[in-house]
Image (cartoon, grey):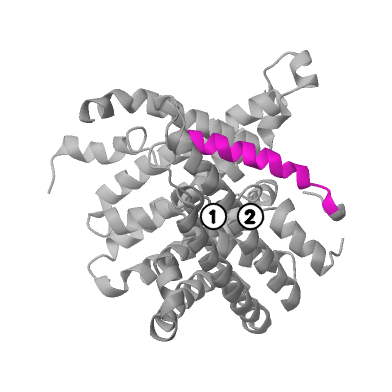
Amino acid sequence: MTSRPSRLKYFTSGIILENPLLVLMIGLCPALATTATARDGFGMGIAASFVLIASNVVVSLLRRFVPSSIRIPIFIIIISSFVTIVDYVLQAYQPGLYAVLGIFIPLIVVNCMILGRAEAFAYHHGVWDSILDALGKSLGFTLALGLMGTIREFFSAGTVFGAVVTPAAFREAPVLFMIFSPGAFLLIGILKAIVNRLTLPKEKMEQ
Amino acid sequence: MKLNPAQIFIGALLINNVLLFRFLGLCPFFGVSNAVGTATGMSGAVVFVMLLASLVTWALYNLVLAPLGLVFLRTAVFILVIASLVQFVEMYLKKYMRTLYSSLGIYLPLITTNCAILGVTFLSIDYRFSLLDSTIFAIGSGLGFGLVIILFAAIRERLNDAPISRSFRGYPIAFIAASLVSLAFYGFAGLFGISL
């Protein structure tokens, strides 16, 4: 079908150029709600990644048997099965993380990124290409969420993954603002502005 | 702590606002908040569907899934029920209520993937609300969504004419404006003894 270099592009494009969160602005709700600490951010990213990779594989395997008129309900059933698996596995083995992520675990089912990849990519491509695409997109999403979680934890508690990285004076009066919702909105605004700054020269040529 | 219906309503409307504090429904929040007109249409549709979805999923969960021990099917059942409900509502409005359809119609398909709807139904279940409480919670949350999105659309209309540096135009400045709106809503915390 396609040559090797372009296949690798399925993987790499999701990490930076088509980063689901910071470039395409998809999956905003979990990105703001579950990134109070680095652990929460990476945890949410990994949970969503599992669902994305697994559902992309299944959709791709079943793509010849799924009639196009009822494909969306079928995709939703496939995705929600994997979401339920993640929901129960986390509840059993990571109760602390589960308590923090709360309803955002079941809400992975309406994450536009996952249905979007099933519809736009996995339904038209082979299994290996779909895995590459899902790996790239989920890595981009996880890194973006982890980055937000790390920055917010650094400012609001002075730690990264619970490890102390700032002087005691900072931890006595940290920037608590960053752990609350205004801080989340502010941080993603600044990150998006940085991404715009880096990608802007290209757009300038077009205008 | 058991909350009375008034506390549930005010809590959902202002203090634990779906958009600003629960972070539910952010895609339409940034997607359709460019003009006050579209924001109003979207919030009307959200209040309507949120109320219907809450009633239907409450009944399904408490009368069907819980007695049969099928609670693990919650996620799959709720999303399918809400998706089909939205389809039926759209068809019904198209046939019998043309005026309402022309104002809400185009927003209805977008609502299926609005995580505020699904999120509110999950929260009602998690809080073990009664039917009355979950109805009030749904109306409060829907109106809270509308209040914030309309307020925010008015702010964004002003932002369009403001001199903003190129990197901050569009999404970034909208996020920063949302940050300030969210900070302002912190003023409501503790109203009627309801905490965040």
Residue A2: image location, x then y, percent:
13, 44
Q: Is residue A52 magenta?
A: no
Residue found at x 59% / y 58%: B146
Residue B127 located left or right of residue A139: right
Residue B195: image location, x then y, percent:
81, 50
> Would residue A144 be seen by someone viewing this image from the given angle?
no
The answer as to whether the residues below labels 2 and 1 share one chain is yes
Q: Which residue is mark 1?
A: B25
Q: As displayed, is residue B164 above or below residue A104?
A: above
Q: In terms of sequence position, does the residue under pointer 2 or pointer 1 come before the other?
A: 2
Residue found at x 21% / y 30%: A206
Residue found at x 54% / y 55%: B25
Q: Secondary structure at mark 2?
A: loop
Residue A128 located left or right of residue A85: left
Q: As displayed, is residue A140 above or below residue B2?
A: above
Say what amino acid the circle numbered 2 marks. Answer: Val
Residue A91: image location, x then y, percent:
65, 56
Q: Residues within 10 Å of mark 1 (few under 14, many from 20)?
A: many
The one nearer the camera, A75 or A128, is A75
Work out which quarter of the rendered image holds the C terminus of chain A and state it: top left
> Would residue B85 be seen by someone viewing this image from the given angle?
yes
Q: Quadrant of residue A159?
A: top right
Pointer 2 with pointer 1, Cβ within 8 A:
yes
Looking at the rendering, the stretch of residues picked out in magenta corresponds to B173-191
Residue A106 located left or right of residue A139: right
Q: Which residue is mark 2?
A: B18
